[in-house]
Amino acid sequence: MASWTFLTNHAHVLVCIAKDPGVRVREIAIRVGITERASQRIVGELVSEGYVERRREGRRNSYSVKGRLPLRHPMDSNHAVGEILTVLAETDQ
């Protein structure tokens, strides 16, 4: 396995949610290769910063990504999150 990657775990979590809005936190952790606790923390951060909306549907959560929000780094802030997800998640955000 590579010692570094181009995308952060936050980006990988966003991709998982964009591909499958009903994904469980446990499944996100498995797909990204992080602990379930780290997955919960990242989803919580994305929700609190407004990049992801969480809705309760019965016993499960459903998520939606706010693709029009800008990327957080100053070098990239003129681009929206949805631009990256269009490529990586093959979705129309």
Image: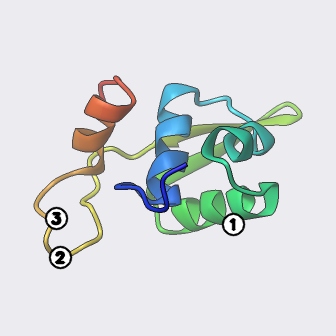
Residue at mark 3 to residue at mark 1: CA–CA distance:
24 Å
Q: Nearer the viewer, residue 77 or 53?
A: 77
Residue at mark 1 to residue at mark 2: CA–CA distance:
23 Å
Q: Element type at marker 3?
A: loop
Crowdedness near tag 1: few (<14), some (14–19) or many (≥20) residues, C-alpha within 10 Å: some
| Quarter location, residue 62 | top right
Which percent across, then down, holds residue 35? Answer: 77, 57
Q: Which amino acid does label 3 sit on?
A: Asp
| Quarter location, residue 40 | bottom right
Crowdedness near tag 3: few (<14), some (14–19) or many (≥20) residues, C-alpha within 10 Å: few
Crowdedness near tag 2: few (<14), some (14–19) or many (≥20) residues, C-alpha within 10 Å: few
In this picture, residue 4 sits left or right of residue 68 = right
Instruction: Read off the residue under disc 3.
Output: 76
Are dots 3 and 1 in contact, CB under 8 Å? no
Q: What residue type is labelled 2?
A: Pro
Vertical comparison of 61 with 21: above or below: below
**Residue at (22, 41) in percent of width and height:** 83
Instruction: Read off the residue under disc 2.
Output: 74
